[in-house]
Amino acid sequence: MKIPPYLTAALAFLWLWSGLQPVLTAPDASLQLLADIGIATPWRRPLFYAASAWDVLLGILILTPLRRLPALWLLQSVSIAAYTLIIACCLPAYWLHPFAPLVKNLSLLALTVYFYQQTRSS
């Protein structure tokens, strides 16, 4: 099955925005979240920029022919699962957040696992 372009475009936009938006509009809040999950001060800024760059990289890769590789979807699935587990364990109040970011991550995880399976079988 070919993955519809509108789905890859939407996921690319999600990754690109999730990587750029914190850097452009909310660096202090993002660094505070890293503090809240227990990241030591010297590691916060490098981790923040590394995570942002990783998200942007995933967004860019989705827009290339590499989207046909199962490994790209597996990397996204692992990233979403890791982000979700860290937030769920360290900031459990996010399960009750009015915008439900953790619940939405479950849908994204299911979608990327599905794309992984589809690219593996094609």
Image (cartoon, rainbow, N blue to C red):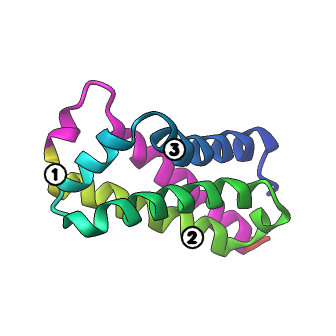
Q: Nearer the viewer, residue 122 or 105?
A: 105
Residue lying farthest to the top in this orientation: 98
Q: Quadrant of the N terminus?
A: bottom right
Name the spot of residue 7 as percent of width and height, x first: 70, 42
- Label 3 amino acid? Ser
Name the spot of residue 6 as percent of width and height, x first: 76, 38
Name the spot of residue 43 as percent of width and height, x first: 29, 68
**Where on the picture, by quarter, is residue 97?**
top left
**Where on the picture, by quarter, is residue 57?**
bottom right
Per the rendered image, the range of residues in magenta is 93-120
> Disc 1, disc 3: CB below 8 Å?
no
- Label 1 amino acid? Asp
Mark 3, residue position: 18
Give the alpha-carbon distance from disc 1 to disc 3, as whole Å: 19 Å
Comes first in the chain, label 1 or label 3: 3
- Label 2 amino acid? Leu
Q: Secondary structure at mark 3?
A: helix
18 sits left or right of 104 in the view: right
Give the alpha-carbon distance from disc 2 to disc 3, as whole Å: 18 Å
Placement of 90 over or under 75, stated as above or below: above
Mark 1, residue position: 36
Q: Nearer the viewer, mark 2 or mark 3?
A: 3
Q: Residues within 10 Å of mark 3 (few under 14, many from 20)?
A: some
